[in-house]
Image (tube, helix red, strand yellow):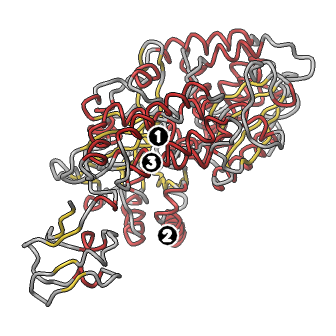
Amino acid sequence: MKRLRSIEDFESLQSRIMTDHDAAVPTIVIPAGTCCQASGANDLIRVAKRELLDKKLTDTVRLRITGCQGFCQMEPSVLVEPRGTFYPKVGMKTMARIVEYVARDEVLADELFMSPDTGEQIERQEDIPFFRNQVRTILSRNEKIDPLFIYDYINNQGYSTLAKVFKMADPDWVINEVKVAGLRGRGGAGFPTGLKWEFLANQANGHGKFLVCNADEGDPGAYMDRSVLEGNPHGVIEGMIIGAYATGATGGVIYVRNEYPLAIKHLIIALRQAREVGLLGENILGTGFSFDINLVKGAGAFVCGEETALIRSIEGKTGEPRQRPPFPVQKGIEGKPTAINNVETWANIPIIIEKGAHEFAKIGTENNSGTKIFSLVGKAKYTGLVEVPMGTTIKRIVYEIGGGPVGDARIKAVQTGGPSGGCIPADLFDIPVDYDSLSKAGSIMGSGGMIVMDDNTCMVDIAKYFMNFLKDESCGKCFTCRKGTQRMYEILDDISQGHGTLEQLQLLEELAQVVKDTTMCGLGQTASNPVLSTLRYFREEYLAHIQDQRCPSGVCRALITYSINEKCKGCQLCLDACQQDAISGKKKELHFIDQSKCIKCGACKSVCKLDAIDVV
């Protein structure tokens, strides 16, 4: 790669790349993020390459390998540009046919996405309800870029906002743009990004300053940051360089969890390419401004998502929080002023500079501008990554984008904010998803996890699951967090086992409030949310476990009984599935379950095709 010596060199290169690129040439786009590869995307890539080579189509049909495009449930998928044709759940034989049809500029109609409501085939990606109801300002860039090639990013206006900032030569203007845009940190607390940058810029720069990208995404079910890093690492890098120029930072760190090998691979390649081209390192584009970024792999501790614990981990120390003040912008890495933002926040910076602060602020609501990416998982018909304007209601996300419930069971609640978040009941789904509204409802935005739960979900069991996670992830520095989360888990376990009392229920609530009020860091202060929110909205389920010795959702094993009803036709599927020999009965006759042998594993119910297994 030729190193660029000036802004003019960069603009000349970008002009050349964009001129040489013919957008009218048919392009087969195969998403190959982690979820895509797990579903078989690599097989499709091999088939597509073979077909293009064998049929000598490489001059007339392009192939682009990208990161995740969001509709994870339909992977492996294929998008054909410029038509916008979307093919879901593509097999290897279908892939070969797609190449053939693309070469003829035809559509393989029988493999298109089928509307579940009308049964009609939908060709264009933008017409599919999952995509149509989103505003994809960040995720839409994933499908346009091969993350392994910096020139692909430059062809899509990449690094042009950095060149614009350099030409403006006014760091204060950049900070003001971010402030006017109203961008709040997407990592959970929602602190105004421009204000944080202003604090850092005002710190003395005698020994250097640091910027950090927090990619320690530890919430169960959340994978937004991973997908952005896999699909568009240069967008994050460009955002950090702009932030460094605005604040006077001299060094950068991307802290990414070691469980994200593909994101790490793409980041390493992107950082190397940016240095080779001259967009990172010493004297960037001949401006005299120098800034470099190092990659630090985290060991996966949930508490390292907290700023001060993350800083200690970067320094090679045990990841545990420290008291604030001083805040990181005053004393961070190696005692130097440090500003920390998460992946999605950094990815928004080039968009703000490109669109302009006022245009960016038009998206979303007052005090909650821009879009937010959520990982929509659980008991929704369509799951994946969802990007919507801040202030969009939960109902719209779950029903219009997610398609509503999977089966006959009614959607009961949505859990937002990961383990430190809360459960919001269905009758509150009209509230807008923003930092303030979620906080009032007893939850948090978090990094953007959104788990949909239906009537088959026990809220006591959910609170127990998250408390088990949090007690294990507590660093132990605060006594109330270390022992409080453990004791809350023990009480929840007693209740789920049928040993709970009303006195324990009162103790659980009091203990949750004490942990919330007396712990030092964000993990401890929000650790009680799963308990407090489920007690607030689903107290009747707790009472059913304690007073009636019954789990209404049929989840807590100690409080349920499996039995066979009159619908049984003696097919013996349940008998074969039972590993405890607890089921008996002759073929074509009513079967029975021996309760003394039954371990309540649910295998019988999972194989029964006649709804002949009752759970009470």
Closest to the camera, between mark 1 and mark 2, is 1
**Where 40 sits versus 175, above or below?**
below
Q: Is residue 208 left or right of residue 338?
A: right
Q: Position of residue 2 (x, y in %)?
A: 82, 42
Check whether the beta carbons of the residues at disc 1 and disc 3 lie within 8 A of each other: no
The quadrant holding residue 111 is bottom left
Q: CA distance from mark 3 to mark 2?
A: 46 Å
Mark sitting earlier along the chain (3/2): 2
Q: Is residue 608 left or right of residue 537?
A: left
Q: Position of residue 78 (x, y in %)?
A: 42, 56
Mark sitting earlier along the chain (1/3): 1
Q: Amino acid at mark 2?
A: Val
**Where 17 sits versus 265, above or below?**
above
Q: Secondary structure at mark 2?
A: helix
Mark sitting earlier along the chain (1/2): 2
Residue at mark 3 = 464
Return the residue nearer the eye: 40 or 517.
Answer: 517
Check whether the beta carbons of the residues at disc 3 and disc 2 lie within 8 A of each other: no
Q: Is residue 524 left or right of residue 90?
A: right
Closest to the camera, between mark 3 and mark 2, is 3
Return the residue nearer the eye: 208 or 315.
Answer: 315
Residue at mark 1 = 449
The numbered dot on residue 76 is: none
The numbered dot on residue 47 is: 2
**Residue at 60 percent of width and 49 percent of height:** 472
